[in-house]
Amino acid sequence: MSVLTRRHLLSRAALSARAVPATRLSAASATSTAPAATGTGTAPGGGDTDAESDSAPGRRTSPEDRLGLRFPEGFGWGAATSAYQIEGAAKDDGRGESVWDTFSHTPGRVRGGDTGDVAADHYHRYLGDLDLMQELGLRTYRFSISWPRIQADGTGAPNQRGLDFYRRLVDGLHQRGISPMATLFHWDLPQSLQDVGGWESRDVAYRFADYAEAVFTGLGDAVPVWLTINEPKTVVQNGYLGGHHAPGLRDPAAAYLVAHHLQLAHGLAVQALRATGSSSRIGPALNLHPCYPADDSPEAAAATRLYDGYENRLYLDSIFKGAYPTDVLEDLGPDSRMVRAIRDGDLSIISTPVDLLAVHYYTPIYVTATGGTVRKWPTSEASWQQIFPQGMYDILTRVTRDYGSIPLTITENGLATPDVLAADGSVDDPARIVFLRDHLAAVHRAISEGVPLESYHVWSLMDNFEWNEGYEQRWGLIYIDYPTQRRILKRSAHWYRRVIAENAI
């Protein structure tokens, strides 16, 4: 492992949740989140951001103003959630404990001592939530399945009550004309598996494949699209480098061993679906950060290349090229736990052909000559998130350029804003509308240039338990009044309903 990497490995994880905020975007000043086409920090080769989105500050008077950009017929407009963040019902119907139950109940781990025990109580209120999805006009809904709800201890026969809940959810989606997209793992590893090593154990990847097979068998082709592992990079960086996500470790030696086993689990799950003969599609869900040099120096360019290896190519190359990036392996060194754990045939499993790639885009990364990072753009309430719509275009076109015409879906893109329930019962979130509009303009531009993007899912459908931030941050289109569990459509939800109805921004 190089000196550069040793120095910045932990700071790489800190980018996700612990950095000091830069200037934040205020709701009052939100006219456009898109940067001007020139100036310090403009992405190299990014082109003119204004050319299609007409998004220079001051040109519009209302976030709802139309841009006149129509999307392809049949484009999938959706929203996304995850099990631990919204379901609640932590002990209902045979659900076991997950690492997030353990983590959130550990004092000092989560802001305000919050837990996901109740969350948005979606487990008990899913029918009303389905009706709200229908009211919004959603065409696709991406959710996750709780592994400990299916297998309390991560092994053995599936819990039928858990499967029945997801069958009711899936059936309810179909009844409302909404296509289900299910994620198998969104970070809620059964605590029993963590007790025997968690993702540091190769065996857990095989236990995941068994769990996946049980879910495939239980729900069948009623789920047309499956996603395997949600954001493996976040598990690595936040769970094993920064320690601010479950399981809360700061162990660089273990972190990239975990990365390998997560990738292996992905491939094994793809093979498990193929073995059932299912006609459903399957692919990974990766959070991709476009990486740019912070200046024009050769040193910054070289540092950016390596940083991109850890952020993006480690996951993309292994799935789509059947090899880990050479520069990353060399940087880790031959004695690293990850490198020593790679067995003959592992990369063949990991690169089992998939049907699509789910992309999450939240923020760019600017890398200095010494391998550190700097900020170029205002941030959201989540201080790690720089608001840079051009990055959406850059990452989508880069994936298509470097990895071929694999069908793409955006399964997370959204903004945390300081939403407040007004006396009249409304929630005014203009900054979220501007953010989504400007990012959708970048999406439209990418599609117009040949990127095979099929659908877009806002993060998130509703406010939820935001991991180590607890309930402090609100990301949803739907406001959750947690004391009463009342649901209120925000201004952005009404705007998004119009976008879906018109298939245009």
Image: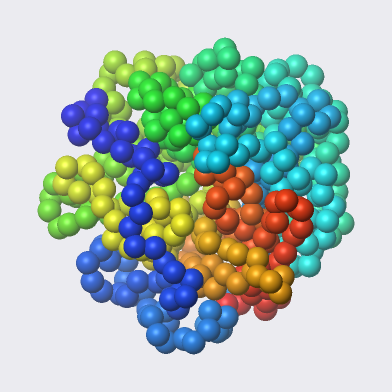
Image quadrant in which the C terminus is located: bottom right
Which residue is at a point 58% across and 14% down the rendered structure image? 195
In this picture, residue 330 sits left or right of residue 263: left
In this picture, residue 305 sits left or right of residue 297: right
Image quadrant in which the N terminus is located: top left
Residue 321 picture location, percent across and down: 42, 38
Location of residue 354 with respect to 153 vertically, above or below:
below
Give the mark count: 0
- Asked where in the image residue 429 lies, by quadrant, the reply is bottom right
Location of residue 489 with respect to 263 vertically, above or below:
below
Q: In this view of the protein, can residue 464 be seen by the observer?
A: yes
Q: In this view of the protein, can residue 214 be seen by the observer?
A: no
| Colour pattern of the rendering | rainbow
Residue 34 picture location, percent across and down: 40, 71
Which residue is at a point 51% across and 51% down the rendered structure image? 359
Which residue is at a point 49% across and 87% down the rendered structure image? 61
Residue 78 picture location, percent across and down: 66, 60
* Residue that protrudes farthest toward the top in the picture: 196
Residue 419 picture location, percent across and down: 58, 63
Which residue is at a point 82% across and 60% down the rendered structure image? 131
Q: 375 or 455: nearer the eye?
A: 375
Q: 168 or 180: nearer the eye?
A: 168
Q: 73 or 395: nearer the eye?
A: 395
In this picture, residue 150 sits left or right of residue 288: right
